[in-house]
Amino acid sequence: MLRKIFALMKKEFRAILKNKKTRMVLIIPPIAQILVFGYSASFDLNKVPFAVYNEDPGLASRQLLARFQGAETFHLVDTIDHDDGIAPLINEKKVMLVLHIGPDFTRNLSKGQPAKLQVILDGRNSNSAMISLNYVRNIVMEFNRHWAALHGGHHVPAQLVVSSWFNSSLDSHWFIIPGIVALLALVVTLEVTALSVAKEREAGTFDQLLVTPMTPLEILIGKSLPGFIIGFVEATFIITMTILWFHVPFRGSFLVLYLGIFAFLLSAIGIGLMISSISVTQQQGLMGAFLFLVPAVILSGFATPIENMPRFVQYITYLNPMRYFLIIVRSSFLQGASFDLLWNLYWPMALIGIATLTAAGMLFRNRMY
Amino acid sequence: MDVMRLRGLVRKESRQIIRDPSSIGIAFFLPVLLLLIFGYGVSLDARHVPLAMVVEKNSPQATALVSGFNQSDYFLPIPMRSIQEAEQALMERRVDGIIWLRHNFARDLLTGGKAPIGVIVNGVDSNKARLIEGYVTGVWFNWLERMTEAQGRKLNVPVTVEHRVWFNAAVRSRDYLVPGLIAIIMTLIGAMLTSMVVAREWERGTMEALMVTPVSMKEVIASKIIPYFILGMGGMLLSVLMAVFLFQVPLRGSMWPLIVSSSLFMFTAINMGLLISVAAKNQFVAGQIAIVITFLPAFILSGFVFDIRTMPVVIQWLTHLVAARYFVDILQTLFLAGDIWPLFLINSVWLALMALFFLMIIKKKSRKLLE
């Protein structure tokens, strides 16, 4: 049995690696993508382009604005002196926000009356708008504290003491890059498995395979192993890059993480092979791969939290192996989570894997044309 | 180019589409399904965040603060007896944050000392953590105001921030995510529809049969583009209708820029699929390339969720290679802001340039030559 499986596996590997274009597709995109996505996928803002519309002749407004100009997170693009100047700057995305200070800002401030800083934001990306507004508030809070220390008044009896666990500077790269491990591992495994049976069916060689002494189980294992090995190697490569290149701290245990990778790859291969054995043509295989891949990524919690989804969509996500693996990989990296905090995430993936692999094996025989 | 020959080829291609239901499924069923799931599923606005409340000693001030959290729509406060219990809940991901009032909270508050309010958030999802911090600050500030008012004073803050969010006053993240989703879904559909069609002809040997006919390569390419373009535009129309009527995203721009940019984008996406197909000459490879280079770049580098303006400069240049980037920009602006001509023109020109570039390579790669 082992010899037969090994022979089929060897043939599968040859089919994958023989073609120069396929080799390139397997090797170059993951390297390029971890680098490009690692740098680009972030919710943090830096150098937020802004414009200033200051009607106040006083000193205080200039002191406040100097804080914005000195901050790393902001980048002054333009100064305007008229209401009409705001719209073109924001409409054409030249700035993300405009700071408007009215004519009596300094006067109010020195009289102890509330002085207003008006912020006009581009809401086309409302998440960026809210984040940059938070940055503005932080700078104003600093200014207030400084002003109160110099001029008295403004005593706040209860301060918030905020600390964030596992990612104290709230660097969103730490959240996204471990997620890319899951993303690329899933894409690569699907790429290897989703077309593998469909290709043979279209070429007619799958019928030949079925009349050999190999059992469907042996065919299944022989078809699974290449995807598993390639997925495993690429996942390891990306994890290494995450730790050594992007310096995301790895606080957990590799055993916990790799057990997760094992279960995740099992489910991904199962789904890939199932898609492939349902499909009669490669075009259908490709469609099936996308039909699974796209919702799996978007509804995984990779970029937008699952808790924000409505109930019925949340129920759908229980069928998504990436949902579970994302938590395992992120907790392993940032939280240093142990097995007992994560155990209930392994078995759903294993279950999905076993169910889809069984279905694929059954479809081998029952879907003949 | 001969119109008669072209018509014949288009007819053959259309029949092939109609007879294999998967193409029709891709064009009409897929956008509806994906938009339906994503439109509801994708949101960055946290609501009902589970929050552990640890109040070590009851006092009127502490109760007032807790009720502030109870009334907030953003939080789902869960009372806990000790900080240890709350920390354990945070470790197990049952809560996303902790509010901790120590036993000396009320006393410090009254004696005018500094009474700290402990806030611990789970920083793994940093974006959410930052939002939670913002919401907590809001609740805290309201509580401070009410407390100082109750003492007959006014909370005196030197500078207050007043904000106005243009184009999306309610700050609904769905309003900008849905137009972006349309661009992503259309990228996929263009690639899925066409990435196999030329490779299939090569693989089955029908390309060689076509070569001995008087049909020119230009006509073959055109006959591949036309039916899939019409199919793709049908899907596009459905998506826009769903965005407006189902998801209630305001469409503030006018119709014809929407039609022009959609056509341009569809044309570019289909050309990209064709290019994959022509270059691969093999369905297996074409399919693999399509999986790798269409979805993820469109998802991450298009400005759909991750703002391009905050990426490193080198990556910002790279995003110019992603067609979806221009369409996301056009759609977000057309839907939320209206007709902003300079943006529309720049992005459309880029799209047109990309389409032409793809077309040129396709032409170069698809000579009537056997290897």
Image (cartoon, coloured by chain):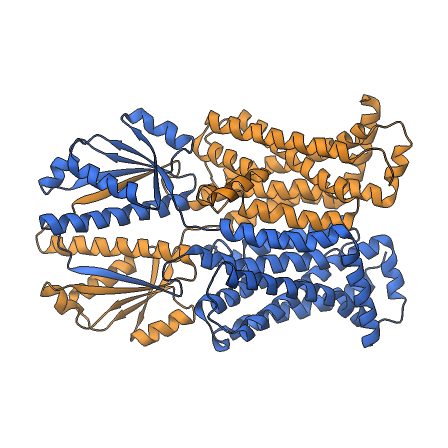
Chain colours: A blue, B orange
> Which of B363 and B303 lies nearest the eye of the viewer?
B363
Residue B323 position (above or below residue A354):
above
Residue B83 position (above or below residue B289):
below
Question: Which image quarter is the C terminus of chain A in?
Answer: bottom right
Residue B343 in view = yes
Question: What residue lies at 66% left-to-right and 29% top-to-bottom?
Answer: B356
Residue A288 position (above or below residue A338):
above
Q: Is residue B129 left or right of residue B12?
A: left
**Residue A262 point in image, percent of width and height:** 62, 70
Residue A129 position (above or below residue A230):
above
Tell me which corner region of the image, top left, top right, bottom left or bottom right, holds residue B158.
top left
> Which of A10 and B148 lies nearest the eye of the viewer?
A10
**Residue A367 point in image, percent of width and height:** 81, 60
Question: What residue lies at 29% left-to-right and 26% top-to-bottom?
Answer: A83
**Residue B176 point in image, percent of width and height:** 46, 41
Question: What residue lies at 36% left-to-right and 48% top-to-bottom?
Answer: A131
> Which of B207 and B107 lies nearest the eye of the viewer?
B207
Question: Which image quarter is the N terminus of chain A in?
Answer: bottom right
Question: What residue lies at 79% left-to-right and 47% top-to-bottom?
Answer: B282
Q: Is residue A232 left or right of residue A138?
A: right
Q: Is residue A284 left or right of residue A86?
A: right
> Which of A63 and B142 lies nearest the eye of the viewer?
A63
Tell me which corner region of the image, top left, top right, bottom left or bottom right, holds residue B116.
bottom left
Q: Is residue A72 left or right of residue A201?
A: left
Residue A316 in view = no
**Residue A21 point in image, percent of width and height:** 75, 50
